[in-house]
Amino acid sequence: MAYSFSGGIHPEYHKQLTAGKPIETLKAPAKVVLPMSMHIGAPCQPLVAVGDKVDLGQKIADSPAAVSAPVHATISGTVTSIAPMPHPTGAKVLSIVIENDFEDRLSPAIHPVDWEGMTTDEICAVIREAGIVGHGGAAFPTHIKIKSAIGKVDTMIINAAECEPYITSDHRLLLERPEEMMGGVAILLKACGLKTCTLAVEKNKDNAFAGIRKLMEGRNDITLLPMNVKYPQGAEKQLIFTVTGREVPSGGLPADAGCIVFNADTVGAVYRAFHQGMPMIRRIVTVSGSAIGNPKNLEARIGTPLADLVEACGGFKEEPKKMLMGGPMMGNPQYTLDAPVIKGTNAFLGFSGSEDKTVEHPTCIRCGKCVSVCPMHLTPVYLNMYATAGRLDEAAELGMLDCIECGCCSYECPGRLYLVQTFRAAKQRIQEERRKKQAEEKARKEAETAKKAKEEGNAK
Amino acid sequence: MSDLKQVIATSSPHIKTEDDTRAIMLDVIIALLPAFAISIFTFGARAASIVAVSVITAVLCEWLYRRLMKKPQTVGDLSAVVTGMLLAYNVPVTIPLWVPMIGSAFAIIVVKQLYGGIGKNFMNPALAARAFLFSWPVLMTTWVMPRTALPLFATPVDVVSAATPLATLKGGALPDGVSLLQCLLGQTGGCLGETSALCLLAGGLYLVYRRVISVRIPLAYLGTVAVLCLLFPMGNDPFLWTGYQLLSGGLMLGAIFMATDYATSPVTAKGQILFGVGCGLITVFIRYFGSYAEGVSYSILIMNATVWLIDKYLRPRKFGYQKPKKEKKPAKAAEGGAA
């Protein structure tokens, strides 16, 4: 098997800024902001009220919806407000604010769980109660992922590619705490009813391999796959292709290719949920970029305001021109340091310069570089032509909805076109139109059946 | 802490490659320099004055047109410099200086700007202009032997046109008195930038190394010509015949620098190969059966007109659109796994 996929780019990684920095535990902040939506699915409803005292690890919000994940107090203290607060997505989201009493009083609900005799459903229930969601960025609830994959998958992959530039949080995790991930693997294998899994890591993290191999001794349930360094190696579809040679069908899920993929840190979170009984209360966050005084890997409580992260890293050494949550290829821009670390946060970056190289008049020179780097093997140059001309049907035919927004085309474009931005808007419009069409179709059919029923009634 | 007034929020990705359009065009200019140097060595300083006139006209026309039409200025992307150089490379060194001036103006204004500027033209500007300049067929085919003394600016008079290796090949015979090495080093008659295959190849390697072009179009083009010449050597030694065919005329210049022009070649891998093969077929066809000795420029122009079609029908297979056949085993294994 080739240790890569076709397409992709080799950006400057800048990982050396933090790759050698051990994970530093950030002291708990004076207050945490816990949004009710840190996952894909229904937002949670608060279970506490203003003025309530809460313990560390106590469940403070949940939802009866099928796809959701509960929220836990990440410090002990008093709930001071429940109101819409800035969220890393840019919107304001209902959030519970807790003021720290600096006691870190553990909730009595927290106790280790013995998983050995458990069924899939029981393991999923524990994972759900721990509020675990995918750590890769999309933050899909982990228990739903397992349940929907049962019986369909034969391959489990642990994603430690960490292909985004700057980010080193998974790298440090593998290097410093491989036992957490290796322990979580056994639990997830049992839950999925599988015997073995593949740990897929880009070769630039090879200094962590020795520690992992040591833990692999005497175990035959995990294989280490060093992959070539290329962006987006960690994108789910590209990763599955690299590991198995299978392509996730268009519009399908990894399970349609017989695969289930977990981020390395998600596996670590599962381990902690069982061995310590601890729900998702912290994350390792790489704080880096040209504007950050002293880039670091910080282990922060979820809900920690971004300002605390920046302060712990020596503040901004230059006025930041751009702030991001996540990597520079797919991360979300931030406009306020009041937004908190959430479950899907793996990095906070501050840029002082012209990293994004915008120009006044982007011009396509038809060089075709976008075509050669597209990991989905699309033709961005034509997608862009059709999308900007408003010819959405043709754009959809060219595979617009298959675009994974990885950013390779925009990165490579010498004319500096806003390709991903255009595609994102076009995808939304195509989906809106499809929904509209479906709704119209449904209404028409209903009207027809009603008419028929009426006619039949009249006939009688 | 900073007040964050400066912070901007734009769409991902937030980093970009260093290589913009200007950097790419600069690479092309660099890749064209070895051929320029050997041209001055072979044909004298007049080669430099023709290139200079051609480039200056091209840049001036681009600047003027964008300014008069009140469009964003694009002279800075250096593409007009490339067009000017390529046009100069495609004329004989004896040409009166007003001819490349007209050619450059035609290339930039009619072929490039009237279609919307860089990236929008459907024909290679330099080649279309060359075709236009054949309105003066005698001027465009007055060849001289290397190291003929020529005036720097004035129009040369009483030049005896020399036979190029290509003209001899046209007659079905191997060039007499011109070795393959001379063709490689450009010590033959011909257009001022096309004669040295070695210098053009060096430029091509640089472009491939810098990832400005892929090898697909040049290889498919040269490969097709080579195969056809090997198969049909017209009674000559097949290898010598093929060698001369590959190293003579505008083939190297065309295959490396003109057929790979971004705006006028396909963007997909399969399309680029088909495009190169098409150029090769038509080139050999014209060289063997046409009334012109050279078929490179017309073959590329003809293939330019097919690019839209090629791109439409030779798209890459999209990821995730596999024909479902060979993945039967994992499905079974999955059942076993769940049991």
Image: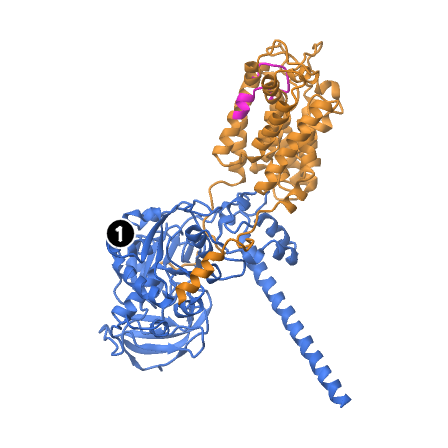
Chain colours: A blue, B orange
Residue at the far right: name it: A459
For the residue labelled by badge 1, is the local secondary structure a helix, a strand or a loop?
A: helix
In the rendered structure, does residue B198 fall within the stretch colored magenta? yes
Q: Is residue B177 above or below residue A210?
A: above
Q: Quadrant of residue A389?
A: bottom right
Residue at the far bottom: name it: A460
In the rendered structure, does residue B308 fall within the stretch colored magenta? no
A341 with respect to B71 (left or right): left
Badge 1 density bin: few <14, some 14–19, many ≥20, Cα 10 Å: some
Depth order, front residue of A316/A384: A384
Secondary structure mostly seen in magenta is loop
Q: Amino acid at mark 1?
A: Arg
A26 with respect to B86 (left or right): left
Quadrant housing the N terminus of chain B: bottom left
Highlighted range, magenta: B186-201
Q: Is residue A127 above or below residue A253?
A: below
**Letter of the chain that mark 1 sits on in the rendering:** A
A197 with respect to B68 (left or right): left
Q: Position of residue A318 (x, y in %)?
A: 36, 51
Depth order, front residue of A195/A124: A195
Quadrant housing the C terminus of chain B: bottom left
A241 with respect to B312 (left or right): left
Q: Position of residue B234 (x, y in %)?
A: 67, 18
Depth order, front residue of A112/B145: A112
Q: Position of residue A121 (x, y in %)?
A: 37, 74
Q: Is residue A254 visible?
A: yes
Q: What residue is disc 1 on?
A: A213
